Image: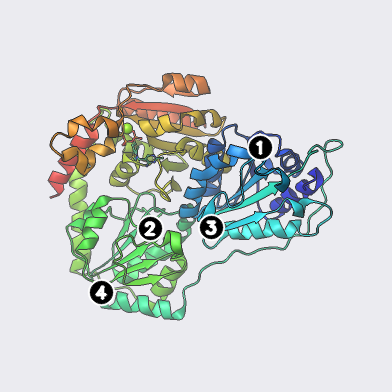
């Protein structure tokens, strides 16, 4: 059972393996872990609510690419980590969870705060280990356990790891601080999935045959920024447009939105990672007759072909694969009618969209454009309409864009953005909906002094549901309140409670000013953009009509 000294050695081993941050939630059973973490030199963050804590750590890891550690007590505490663990699993984010646990003899006998925590997260973690005994006595394996947990969390694919740590009383050290013994840890290089020669041959063959191809990229982790040059090289040698989701890390000046390809028929599509968020994509894919290539991680949970239409799947790193196939294909393809065709489609979409973004009145589309272009060093897009509207209006995006598209929850967005801002020190803008903010309103307390500006689009409810077929059913008005959950609340009081600066701009120029000032001052703030409830519904209907 862990002594505080041995626990300190464990955390020192995590530090040696590249971990920098631990998010702690208070408790007694976790005493050796807290004492050990405090002795290790790692940065500690205290977050009372384990659900917030887990999303905060998730945001740190999502932004930094480093595993973040979570420590909590026994009982229901670890269960509050569940949503963030699921997101980490499906979005491939490295997260290492340490739950303190009672010793085996105190299970199933009425001992307080005791539940069966073995495999608490079921099949949703990359690795589960019960390690209480390993931290007892002078076992030499502590360094190995930390290295193994880090390697499993970094993948490939990256994801969550759960270590359950049984502890028997007494937990306390004889005196503080405890001394830390340097652990013996192996140096670990995580797996990088390299495409085989055969995979490159197959992909090059698809590109040679298809003159009218398209490269598409859905939301991806920030590491995909490293693939930018390789994707551009592949686009150049194939003459294919890059249809890059705003959250793909690949949205550059020459990229086009999904709407731009709706009007054209391609004869091949190369999908990089997850499918794009836009519903237009699914409709377009149904009509595709040529090959559909999916490149990226293809392990069970992250196999990115929900429609089952892929004809070729290359389970390898996107950047490496694009670079290799671009090299294989060699010289630039001559521009021809295909290039003209999609460029003119992209221009047509722009001529429809830009007038809708003119003027100084507050609108959801306008706010999305203003947030994306506010000069933040990092952008976080909330789910529901925000990520979709940002995708519609974003032009080139040069900074990392974080999104929660593993499980697409509207939960934990504030905590995640706070973790991302804190871990990177980048000035961060979070765009999210009012129901999403209500869901995570408690996490405004974890923003602290992180350089985070939370921009809430308050359309008084979940207005995405007005886009769904249910809203068009005759008589739907009787049930729509159960979907939209209109609440009539503003967030001024929430900002005050959390000690955040607050602004409720009445115009877009005021919004831009409030955003610009808060970001430049790196001052945490909440900006509330109050818009008419049905504004997005009307704008999207107008847009669809014009694009037809
Ligand atoms: C944890 C979780 N609960 C429920 C949902 C289902 N859901 C998707 S969008 C949405 C409404 C979001 O409303 P809001 O944040 O105001 O955004 P808007 O639709 O107005 O853009 C809900 C409840 C979800 N995705 N995640
Ligand atoms: Mg809303």
Mark number, residue 110 = 1
Foreground residue, 325 or 67?
67
Residue under label 2 = 274
Residue under label 4 = 210
Q: Please rate how many residues cluster around mark 4, counting C-alpha atoms within 10 Å: few if below 14, some from 14 to 19, many from 20.
A: some
| In front: label 1 or label 4 | 1
Ligand 1 visible in quadrant: top left
Q: x, y percentage for residue 1?
A: 77, 48
Residue 330 visible from this viewpoint: no
Q: Is residue 171 above or below residue 318?
A: above
Q: Tell me the SS state at disc 2.
A: loop
Q: Residue at x 51, y 69 (%)?
A: 193
First in residue order: circle 1 vs circle 2 = 1
Mark number, residue 158 = 3
Q: CA distance from mark 1 to mark 2?
A: 46 Å
Q: CA distance from mark 4 to mark 2?
A: 22 Å
Q: Quadrant of residue 528?
A: top left
First in residue order: circle 4 vs circle 3 = 3
State left or right for residue 103 relative to residue 399.
Answer: right
Mark number, residue 176 = none
Q: x, y percentage for residue 78?
A: 59, 42
- The reply to whether the residue tagged 4 has its Cβ within 8 angstroms of ligand 1 is no
């Amino acid at each position: 059972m862990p002594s505080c000294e041995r626990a300190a050695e464990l955390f020192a081993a995590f530090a040696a393996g590249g971990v920098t941050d631990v998010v702690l939630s208070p408790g007694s059973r976790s005493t050796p872990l807290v004492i050990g973490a405090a002795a290790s030199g790692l940065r500690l963050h205290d977050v009372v609510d384990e659900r917030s804590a887990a999303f905060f750590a998730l945001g740190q890891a999502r932004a930094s690419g480093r595993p973040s550690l979570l420590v909590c007590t026994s009982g229901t505490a670890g269960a509050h980590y569940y949503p963030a663990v699921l997101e980490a699993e499906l979005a491939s984010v490295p997260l290492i969870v340490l739950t303190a646990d009672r010793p085996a003899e105190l299970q199933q006998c009425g001992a307080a705060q005791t539940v069966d925590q073995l495999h608490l997260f079921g099949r949703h973690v990359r690795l589960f280990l019960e390690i209480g005994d390993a931290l007892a006595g002078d076992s030499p394996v502590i360094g190995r356990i930390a290295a193994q947990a880090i390697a499993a969390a970094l993948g490939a694919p990256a994801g969550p790891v759960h270590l359950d740590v049984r502890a028997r009383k007494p937990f306390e050290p004889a005196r503080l601080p405890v001394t830390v013994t340097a652990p013996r840890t192996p140096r670990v290089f995580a797996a990088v999935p390299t495409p085989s020669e055969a995979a490159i041959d197959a992909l090059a063959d698809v590109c040679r045959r298809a003159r009218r191809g398209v490269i598409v990229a859905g939301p991806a982790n920030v590491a995909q920024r490293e693939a930018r040059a390789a994707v551009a090289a592949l686009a150049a040698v194939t003459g294919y447009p890059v249809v890059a989701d705003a959250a793909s890390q690949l949205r550059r000046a020459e990229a086009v939105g999904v709407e731009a390809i709706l009007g054209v028929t391609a004869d091949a599509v190369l999908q990089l990672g997850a499918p794009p968020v836009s519903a237009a994509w699914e409709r377009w894919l149904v009509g595709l007759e040529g090959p559909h290539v999916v490149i990226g991680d293809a392990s069970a949970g992250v196999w990115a072909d929900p429609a089952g239409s892929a004809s070729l799947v290359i389970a390898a790193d996107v950047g490496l694969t694009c670079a290799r196939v671009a090299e294989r294909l060699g010289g630039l393809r001559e521009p021809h009618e295909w290039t003209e065709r999609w460029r003119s489609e992209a221009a047509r979409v722009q001529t429809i969209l830009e007038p809708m973004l003119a003027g100084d009145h507050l609108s959801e589309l306008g706010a999305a454009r203003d947030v994306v272009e506010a000069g933040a060093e990092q952008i976080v897009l909330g789910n529901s309409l925000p990520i979709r509207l940002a995708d519609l209006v974003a032009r080139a995006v040069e900074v990392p864009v974080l999104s929660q598209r593993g499980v697409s929850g509207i939960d934990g967005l504030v905590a995640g953005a706070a973790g991302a801002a804190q871990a990177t020190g980048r000035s961060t803008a979070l765009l999210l909906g009012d129901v999403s903010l209500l869901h995570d309103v408690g996490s405004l307390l974890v923003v602290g002094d992180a350089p985070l500006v939370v921009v809430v689009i308050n359309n008084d409810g979940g207005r995405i549901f007005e886009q769904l077929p249910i809203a068009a059913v005759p008589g739907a008005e009787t049930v729509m309140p159960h979907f939209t959950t209109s609440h009539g609340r503003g967030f001024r009081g929430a900002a005050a409670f959390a000690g955040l600066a607050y602004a409720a701009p009445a115009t877009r120029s005021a919004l831009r000013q409030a955003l610009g000032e808060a970001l430049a001052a790196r001052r945490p703030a909440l900006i509330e953009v109050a818009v008419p409830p049905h504004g997005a519904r009307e704008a999207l209907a107008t847009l669809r009509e014009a694009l037809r």
